[in-house]
Amino acid sequence: MIDKTADVATKDPDRLVVVTGGPGAGKTTLIEALGRRGFGITEEAGRAIIREQVAIGGLALPWDDTALFAEIMLTWELRSYRGAERDPARIVFFDRGVPDLAGYLRLLRRPVPAHFEAAIRKFRYHRKVFVAPPWAAIYAQDSERKQTFAEAQRTYEAIIGAYADHGYDLVELPLVPVGERADFVLTHLAAAWPS
């Protein structure tokens, strides 16, 4: 029997690039800067879902129903991936990716369901994943980010472990201003993209 989950969802995963890391480490700021340079970008699932669920009084929140929150995040990530596939000529930077969900569940000491693992195998990204390390100087809590800095550090460790376990090469972002971070990412990827 053929394992259809092993097939890569897109024929060109090299143009789908993930920026991940713990909360409050500057990854969304970097994604937005790359968007201003003309690249495709996606919105982070977690924060968007929290905003929407709070607005409607929903229960898919990390402090109410973590399993439901994770399922909705998976749906969001798959929809973002499929949206990026629609424009095969465009490079898209993802604010987190499907493997983040394995890290999130591991952080909570929950098993990673088989369908999450299947999605991680099928929906592949560029082999280089850019990771924003914990950065105390810029970390701030807000109404959607309730974790302490120590929890953000544990989240970072769980997420990078999930990506490493699924065959990605991790590239740690330097603790520099956003413009320099964007230059760093593009320099690292230049060899993989045709000129």
Image (cartoon, rainbow, N blue to C red):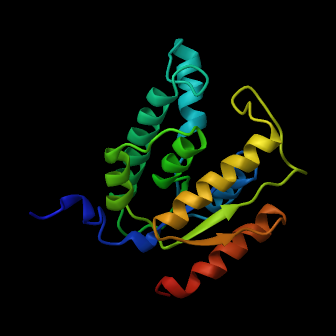
Outermost residue, top direction?
57
Image location (x, y in percent) of residue 8: 29, 66
Residue nearest the viewer, comparing 79 with 116: 116
Query: Which is more toward the observer, 156 or 87?
Result: 156
Tell me residue 83's x, y (percent): 37, 51
Q: Relative to residue 8, is residue 110 drawn left or right?
A: right
Question: Quadrant of the image for the N terminus?
Answer: bottom left
Name the side, left or right, on which 53 lies relative to 151.
Answer: left
At which x and y percent is residue 29?
A: 72, 52
Q: Residue at x 37, y 47 (%)?
A: 116
Q: Does residue 21 appear in the picture of this structure?
A: no
Between 121 and 181, the one nearer to me in the picture: 121
Q: Residue at x 57, y 79 (%)?
A: 189
The relative height of residue 112 versus residue 64 in the rendered view (above or below) is: below
Image height of 109 relative to 84, above or below: above
Count of numbered badges drawn on the protein: 0
Q: Please state which of residues 148 and 177 is positioned toward the viewer in this rendering.
A: 148
As displayed, is residue 98 above or below residue 172?
above
Residue 39 quadrant: bottom right
Residue 145 makes an appearance in the image = yes
Residue at the farthest left position: 1
Q: Is residue 108 left or right of residue 80?
A: right
Residue at 31 percent of width and 53 percent of height: 118
Q: Name, please, the residue furthest toward the right.
A: 137
Please say if 146 is above or below 56.
below
Looking at the image, which residue is at 72% across and 33% down? 145
* Residue 120 figure quarter: bottom left
Give x and y (percent) for residue 181: 75, 68
